[in-house]
Image (tube, helix red, strand yellow):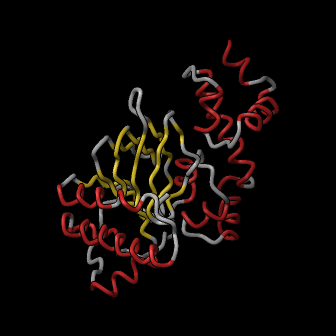
Amino acid sequence: MISPNILYSCYVTRNLSNEQFIPEHIFLYQFSGSLIINDAEKEYSVQTGEFCLARRNRLARYIKIPPQNGEYKTISVRLDQTFLKNFSKEYGYTADMPATNDAVINIQSQPILLTYIQSLTPYFDLTTDGKNEQMLLIKTKEAVLLMLKTNPELKNVLFDFSEPGKIDLEAFMNLNFQFNISMERFGYMSGRSLTTFKRDFKKIFKMAPGRWLLQKRLQEAYYLITKRGQKPSEVYLEVGFEDISHFSRSFSKEFGIAPSKVYRK
């Protein structure tokens, strides 16, 4: 970590991230390895030497893949709403038209962006005291200014401060059931308060959301194991469980057989 908003990441093994919700925009540079991002509708790939902007208020799963005999490395700059609203007032940028709906936007690599990434290297070992935080705030502003200089259309993404509107709950849940997020977050993403979300959910699905999610995830797991031949150890995270022991207990209770035995059949 360089600061709470500028993060340097390094992995030596393939990693499936538990992060399921992108709360703020993230400007990312892929130093080495590759990053696969899936939002249930589309898969995005970020390769070594590429830049992207991951958009806020999106559900996504990350697979971080190091190169052969190497390390996975990224630099990411978190752009929260308070920072961007202050930036908008300071520099006069506003969104003036709808932006692409993609969860991840590829940004073409350019010398000025690469120079910016290189300029962050001296900050890797700084402590996060008040003076250094001010310098890093300037570096965060620099990142946004450079993105807007090289990709002016990004203003319609960065400075769109609207919140999710009310959407088709049945379609949304059937598309996103595998993301392991809270009921409050499901409600927010579908444009509802928690109370309204639970009420609307029960009207549509005729059961409480917690029970429906468990059944849906287990049904998907059974399909992946029996029809796709995937291992239980690969499936449990993919369908929204946090740990394999909970998954195995729930699977056995639902189907009367352990997932490992189903897989061996």
In this view, 45 is above or below 129:
above
Count of residue discs: 0
Instruction: Tell me: 92 left or right of 56.
Output: left
Q: Is residue 79 left or right of residue 239?
A: left
Vertical placement of 124 versus 67: above or below? below
- Is 260 rendered above or below residue 49? above
Location of residue 145 in the rendering, given as x and y in whole percent from the top left corner = 26, 72
Observer-nearest of 28 and 8: 8
Q: For the point 65% across and 27% down, which residue is it?
A: 232
Where is residue 226, by image quadrant?
A: top right
Q: Measuring from the top left, give residue 244's x and y in whole percent.
A: 71, 34
Q: Nearer the viewer, residue 161 or 111?
A: 111
Q: Is residue 53 left or right of residue 214?
A: left
Who's the residue at 41% across and 27% down the image?
69
Residue at 27%, 61% (x, y): give it. Answer: 116
Q: Residue at x 49, y 50 (%)?
A: 60
**Residue 21, picture quadrant:** bottom right
Q: Nearer the viewer, residue 65 or 202?
A: 65
Q: Which quadrant is the C terminus positioned in?
A: top right
Horizontal arrangement in the rendering, residue 72 relative to residue 151 (left or right): right
In the image, residue 254 above or below residue 18: above
Residue 246 position in % (x across, y down): 76, 38
Return the x and y of residue 191 as percentages of the image width and height.
Answer: 54, 69
